[in-house]
């Protein structure tokens, strides 16, 4: 075997966003050796792009809030196919994780009496999102990094993991390459935590960064872990759509939380036309009450713009399809209208939404204090991912844990805004804690040199194809195909067409070629990402075909209603011995009576 540089740790964390950093901190505190691999530079993880806030029932703005309300909101938003134990742990532990961030130096916005300020967000009954203007994710990463740097964590920046290594049924390491110089490296570990984020780059229009190519999901799947809920892909209702160079960039839900309204090209607030029955009692039916809610009136109902993301996205698509969209194919998001209500509206907007103000001013030459924004849905978040134990975060593979967006279960059919940032710290902590415990109870496994050589040969194969396909073109074509066939509105014919296309994409991927050498070669990096994108694209399509109903983020025009037989099941995907993708339906575990009572009380 070639002489590959080898590193050894008790716990190896793959991914350095909020979940990965929190896992690494917790494992290190337990006294074990921790290695942290990140695909880009430390501090550049996709978590920094999370803007609106972190959801936790602190009760600082409305003292009626508590973990029970948060749990019920999360379950209702997820259409009750959530893993209830994860939703329970999340709601109970999120406040402590936020206070912990505060103790570690996070500078949250404040109420007049000095407590952490919380804002309104879609699907949350009360103001629940602790925030730092509209730069909350950036502050979280800064805080976690500043705290983690003192824990003795070994960081490997700009490394990409190609495959997990196993000894029998147990994960024992990872085979990776250094992106800058192209050198292969072996990482041996007693326990591994996957925290690689999402899958947005499988689609053409996405708010996700270049890193979000489904690496963790594909690594776990190939190693024997199960994927769950892959049909549920969240399309955030508000992404930038103009000019083309900014298409898909996120426009935070915080704009709507501070009073922003959605209108069509007729100037009508179309969200009033479509309020789901299960949210009707909580939703304002007039503009004045909705505005009072955004200003903190505890007796007011929330505006319809703050309904769940899946519903708002479909309403926007309806307006566009029926000819009431903007000139560039979106709708208007207007925060400037609050000039009618506040004498100092411009200063208020700049203080509450500084990133949004500068984003639109610099990228689209629009002053959001004076003009409405043009927005449309953008691929944003994967509710699906690696199936894990709710308490320990371990997958079906011994010693392999997962946390954050690449794990799944808490969100069910649809994620509420802000739950992602509390999810990553709640379950990042748990993954790090139990990975360290597993590492203390086990020794390093055997390294399979033959398997490593096979992975290495496959990785460099594109250099041997002088006349191979362009990997950038394959990726572009794949993204367009997924956008067109497995997007917001789905049907059986288009998804079966997608599966046919995916077979051809596998063939094209096996023919891709790159020029140059292994150092500083982004074409090679793109070629290596294709396999991960294809695995998650097929998983999304197979799961969406299997669920013959519309629920949460899955909307099928050929099955437009919810079906009782899918009300208490999850789609589970695993790799068969012959290499094919297997899918099955699995019944949800029965919810205990005390949680059923919580949901009844909060209806």
Image (cartoon, rainbow, N blue to C red):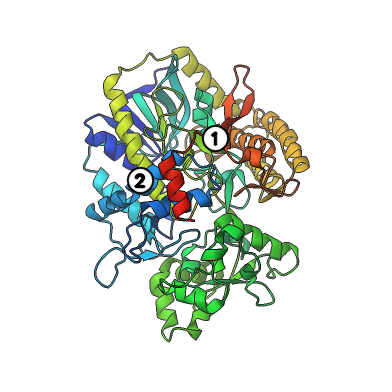
Above or below, 371 relative to 161: below
Q: Nearer the viewer, mark 2 or mark 1?
A: 1
The span from disc 2 to disc 1 (Cα, nearest Å) is: 21 Å
Q: Find disc 2 in the rendering and name its residue.
A: 425
Above or below, 422 relative to 20: below
Query: In which quarter of the view is residue 494 placed?
Result: top right
Residue 442 position within the rendered picture, expressed as x and y whole percent measured from the top left: 30, 18
Above or below, 496 relative to 460: below
Q: Are marks 2 and 1 in contact (CB under 8 Å)?
A: no
CA neighbours of label 1 inside 10 A, class few (<14), some (14 to 19), many (20+)? many
Residue 554 position within the rendered picture, expressed as x and y whole percent measured from the top left: 63, 47
Relative to the observer, which residue lies in front, 504 or 103? 103
Q: Find disc 1 in the rendering and name its residue.
A: 228
Q: Residue at x 57, y 36 (%)?
A: 570
Query: In which quarter of the view is residue 158 placed?
Result: top left
Relative to the observer, which residue lies in front, 227 or 461? 227
Q: Secondary structure at mark 2?
A: helix
Relative to the observer, which residue lies in front, 516 or 441? 441
Q: Secondary structure at mark 1?
A: strand
Comes first in the chain, label 2 or label 1: 1
Quadrant in the picture for the N terminus: top left
Residue 400 visible in the snapshot:
yes
Above or below, 424 relative to 258: above
Left-right relation of 59 to 221: left
């Amino acid at each position: 075997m070639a002489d590959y540089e080898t590193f050894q740790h008790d716990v190896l964390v793959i991914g350095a966003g909020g979940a990965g950093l929190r896992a690494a901190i917790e494992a290190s505190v337990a006294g074990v050796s921790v290695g942290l691999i990140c695909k880009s530079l430390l501090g550049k993880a996709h978590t920094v792009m999370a803007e609106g806030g972190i959801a936790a029932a602190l009760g600082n703005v409305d003292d009626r809030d508590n973990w029970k309300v948060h749990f019920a909101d999360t379950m209702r938003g997820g259409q009750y196919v959530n893993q209830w134990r994860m939703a329970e742990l999340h709601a109970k532990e999120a406040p402590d994780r936020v206070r912990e961030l505060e103790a570690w130096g996070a500078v949250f916005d404040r109420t007049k009496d000095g407590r952490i300020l919380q804002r309104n967000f879609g699907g949350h009954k009360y103001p629940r999102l602790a925030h730092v203007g509209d730069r909350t994710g950036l502050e979280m990463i800064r805080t976690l990094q500043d705290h983690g740097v003192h824990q003795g964590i070994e960081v490997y920046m700009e490394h990409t993991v190609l495959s997990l290594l196993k000894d029998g049924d147990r994960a024992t390491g990872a085979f990776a390459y250094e992106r800058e110089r192209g050198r292969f490296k072996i990482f041996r570990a007693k326990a591994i935590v996957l925290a690689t984020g999402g899958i947005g780059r499988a689609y053409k229009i996405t708010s996700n960064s270049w890193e979000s190519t489904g690496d963790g999901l594909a690594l776990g799947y190939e190693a024997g872990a199960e994927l769950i809920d892959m049909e549920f892909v969240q399309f955030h209702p508000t992404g930038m759509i103009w000019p083309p160079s900014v298409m898909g960039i996120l426009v935070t839900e915080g704009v709507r939380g501070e009073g922003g309204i959605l209108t069509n090209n007729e100037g009508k607030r179309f969200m009033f036309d479509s309020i789901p029955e299960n949210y009707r009692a909580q939703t304002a039916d007039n503009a004045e009450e909705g505005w009072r809610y955004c200003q903190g009136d505890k007796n007011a109902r929330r505006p319809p713009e703050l309904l769940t993301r899946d519903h708002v996205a479909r309403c926007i698509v309806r307006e566009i399809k029926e000819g009431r969209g903007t000139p560039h194919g979106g709708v208007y998001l207007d925060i400037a209208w609050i000039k009618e209500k506040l004498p100092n509206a411009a200063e208020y907007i700049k203080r509450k939404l500084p990133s949004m103000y500068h984003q639109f001013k610099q990228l689209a030459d629009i002053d959001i204090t004076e003009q409405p924004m043009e927005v449309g849905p953008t691929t944003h978040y994967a509710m699906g991912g690696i199936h894990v134990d709710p308490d320990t975060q371990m997958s079906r593979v011994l010693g392999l844990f997962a946390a954050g967006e690449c794990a799944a279960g808490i969100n069910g059919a649809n994620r509420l805004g802000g739950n992602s940032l509390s999810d990553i710290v709640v379950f990042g902590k748990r993954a790090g804690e139990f990975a360290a415990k597993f590492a203390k109870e086990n020794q390093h496994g055997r390294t399979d040199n033959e398997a490593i050589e096979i992975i290495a040969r496959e990785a460099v194969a594109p250099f041997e194809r002088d006349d191979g396909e362009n990997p950038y073109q394959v990726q572009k074509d794949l993204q367009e195909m997924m956008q067109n066939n497995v997007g917001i509105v789905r049907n059986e014919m288009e998804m079966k067409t997608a599966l046919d296309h995916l077979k051809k994409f596998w063939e094209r991927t096996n023919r891709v070629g790159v020029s140059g050498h292994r150092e500083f070669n982004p074409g090679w990096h793109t070629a290596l990402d294709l396999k991960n994108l294809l695995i998650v694209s097929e998983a999304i399509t197979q799961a969406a075909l299997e669920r013959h109903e519309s629920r949460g983020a899955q909307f099928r025009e050929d099955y437009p209603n919810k079906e009782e037989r899918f009300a208490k099941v999850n789609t589970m995907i695993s790799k068969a011995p012959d290499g094919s993708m297997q899918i099955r339906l699995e019944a949800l575990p029965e919810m205990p009576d005390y949680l059923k009572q919580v949901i009844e009380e909060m209806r």
